[in-house]
Image: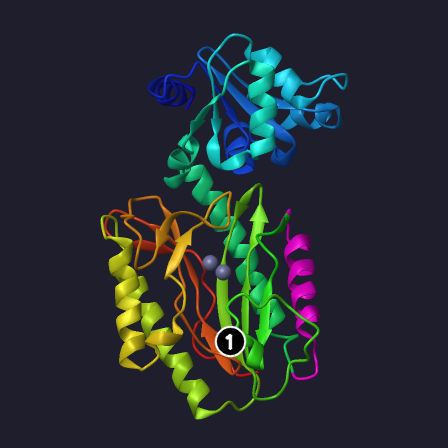
Amino acid sequence: MLAKLQKDIAAIEAEAFLLTNPANVRYLSGFSNPQDARVLVFADEIILITDGRYNAQAKTESKIDYKIFPITKTLNEYLAETVKGKKLAIEADQISVKQYKDLSKLLGYEPIASEDIVAKYRLIKTEAELEQIRAAAKIADDAFSHILNYIKAGVKEIEIALELERFMRMAGAEGLAFDSIVASGYRSSMPHGTASQKLIESGDLVTLDFGACLDGYNSDMTRTVAIGEITDEANQIYHAVLEAQEAALKAVVASIATKDLDKIARTILEKHKLGEYFSHGLGHGVGIDIHEAPRLSMSSLDVLEPNMVITIEPGAYIPGKIGVRIEDLVFVTADSYELVSKSNKNLIQL
Ligand code: ZN
Ligand code: ZN
């Protein structure tokens, strides 16, 4: 890893590279509070830099050497001093204008604004990373089975979200992959309707989109369930989305363009006159970040490769009225895929 990094850093004519993106810091160091740390890469070493609160933690967790910066200095002062006369590159999309100006002043020159070099490494997962994501997905699958006993008319969306969280954390998750979406009835038409105080009612569709974070790696899954009898329209939308989801899923294979996968799902929803209601892309990569490369959408130029981890999540949302999304987590393989989220996708009526 260090050799690859050093080559990429040399290619942008830098002698040192400062990583501030928490996902990249965690990826390179294993340190579990990456928002309070940096990684500095030189030609001959790679170091984690954090503050005094994390001394014991850095010692146990960090896979690379670490340094605690002194409380008598600001982080930027310490970084500038550590880098000394070397030409520094920074992650352009991770630093504010103010931090950039401060750092430039301390260094006496403007650091090179680099692309996200490490994101490219994170695209293709190792076996160990896949194992983490499988384990995170298993927790979410178990949570889904568990939560089916709680979802009923008269219960608040937020109660469902809290019970999902309680279950996943007790099962070993270090946290949620993101704020759980529990969107019932008219709120199911909001693709990102995080759980509210709304009561679930009979006749509602309820969209549950959630995931577990385990040792830094996330899972992501969506299921939509029905509360009692639902309208014919709701039933039709559900089955159209399911048809689109399964068709796109079956087509997952290394070397397919993600925009072609998106097209498979979109064409089916168009056939059911729901094309205009599929208002987002087909899916995204998942790893240390819940949304990372590759992108699966009409405009994406990404092509799948073995050991990418992606979601397949078409949806249809009729504003103010009703919505359905079904999402699976998938590993790309050379000749097919591995389905990682295993929860049932047939319409569940509670
Ligand atoms: Zn999701
Ligand atoms: Zn997703």
Q: Nearer the viewer, residue 138 or 32?
A: 32
Could you tell whether 55 is left or right of 235 in the image? Answer: right
Q: Within the image, what quadrant is residue 283 found in?
A: bottom left
Q: Residue at coordinates 65% horizontally, 65% vertically from top-left?
A: 161
Q: The disc labelled 1 sits on which kind of residue?
A: Ser
Q: Position of residue 337 (x, y in %)?
A: 31, 54
Q: Position of residue 185 (x, y in %)?
A: 57, 81
Examine the rendering and report whether any part of residue 155 can be seen.
Answer: yes
What residue is shown with label 1?
A: 189
Q: Residue at coordinates 58% horizontally, 22% vertically from top-left?
A: 103
Q: Which residues are magenta?
A: 153-174
- Could you classify mark 1 by the number of other residues whose Cα lies within 10 Å: few (under 14), some (14-19), or many (20 or more)? many
Is residue 158 part of the magenta span, yes or no? yes
Q: Within the image, what quadrant is residue 38 found in?
A: top right
Q: Is residue 219 above or below residue 53?
A: below
* Type of colouring: rainbow
Is residue 155 part of the magenta span, yes or no? yes
Q: Residue at coordinates 65% horizontally, 16% vertically from top-left?
A: 78
Q: Is label 1 in a helix, a strand or a loop?
A: helix
Q: Quadrant of the C terminus?
A: bottom right
